[in-house]
Image: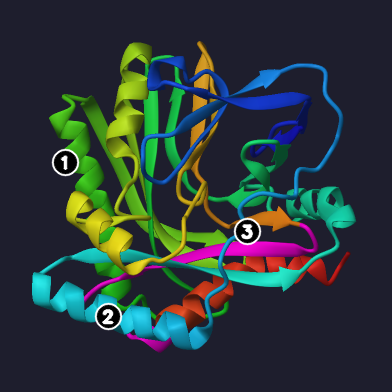
Amino acid sequence: MLLYRFPGKKTQRKSGCFVPCSPSELEGFVISTFSGGKYWRFVESESSDTLFLEGQVPSFQSKEEYILKANQLINAIRSLGLKKVVLSRISTNLFDTDNSKELFNLLEEKYPNALVYFFSDRELGTWIGASPEIIFEQHGQCGVTTSLAGTKKLEDSSSWAEKEKLEQDYVSFFIKETLNLEKIKKIEVHGPYEYIAGPVKHLKTDFLFECSQTKGKELLLCLHPTPAVCGLPKDFAAEIINQIEEHDRELYTGFIGEFSRDSSKIYVNLRCAKITTGAIHYFLGGGFTKDSIAESEWDETENKKKTIADLLEML
């Protein structure tokens, strides 16, 4: 079962399941992991609305455990000369799974500018999310990608801190470099500008460019994962993440969206949660630089959690 809605579009409801595929087979509604090169596409078929709630249960991390890992990461960034690394954690709450579809409906109403989805699959489990970040969009020969990095509370009217500006610069630099290496032409850059995403706001830069349809998938795989969810240098940051994070990110910070012959729209799988028997597990992350403060990064993840968690009170 799959429900999803792109900004400005009607809600799609499909029956079927996700099947593993190669990059060349990415077509229709697709999803990937953060790392490991695992991809799935949705295949429609006759099926029930059964919720698959068993399987891998994400590991909860306390604030004390997170602060310890965060300080280890900050020390590693300083000693190794890394520019940025994204650290994630998982937060768990009790949840009545009978309310899953109603939660999807609330997300649709609350976040009209996000990709909102809900699915339950025998292999992948049950997931829900409202992602604000496009990693790749294409209509004909026109391609789009975005840099979404730097975060603060929605009500914070102060100037953007240097740390947040640097996060945005790092991601934008990576995207520019990738587009140039892939010989992408006619690149237009718009931003950075302030972008509201529910309970938080970000710095965002849009990149518009000329791109053939055959080049689209190749470019997506070059961009994923961006420093917005991994770090910079990307390969080195990914190694540090594998060493410090003890949990499996699963589908969090992978990509999710729709490929078609005429147009494609793929998002980074952010502001998402996995639902298991009696519980909802929020996947949360934030970018660290040498100037990061562990307590502040914890607060940032708590604010991102509100994207879904605040709606539970309305069920």
**Residue 207 relative to residue 169: left or right:** right
Q: Position of residue 60 (x, y in %)?
A: 57, 72
Does the magenta-highlighted stretch encompass residue 208?
no
Relative to 260, residue 176 above or below:
below
Q: Which residue is mark 2?
A: 72
| Residue at the disc numbered 3 | 57
Q: Which residue is found at the position 39% from the left and 33% from the top?
A: 144
Please give the range of residues in magenta. 277-295
Q: Kindly identify the amino acid type of the residue bearing the numbered disc 2.
A: Gln
Camera sees residue 64: yes
Tell me which corner region of the image, top left, top right, bottom left or bottom right, holds residue 229.
bottom left
Outermost residue to the front: 55
Q: Nearer the viewer, residue 181 or 89?
A: 89
Name which residue type carries label 1: Glu
Q: Quadrant of residue 230?
A: bottom left
Residue on which the image places disc 1: 177
Q: CA distance from mark 2 to mark 1?
A: 29 Å
Q: Secondary structure at mark 3?
A: loop
Image quarter where the N terminus lies is top right
Residue at the spot 73% in from the left edge and 56% down from the top edge: 276
Q: Considering only vertical position in the picture, is 54 above or below 50?
A: below
Say which residue appears at 80% left-offset and 63% top-offset. 278
Give the label, 2 or 3, closer to the camera.
Answer: 3
Q: Nearer the viewer, residue 23 or 248?
A: 248
Label total for image: 3
Q: CA distance from mark 2 to mark 3?
A: 26 Å
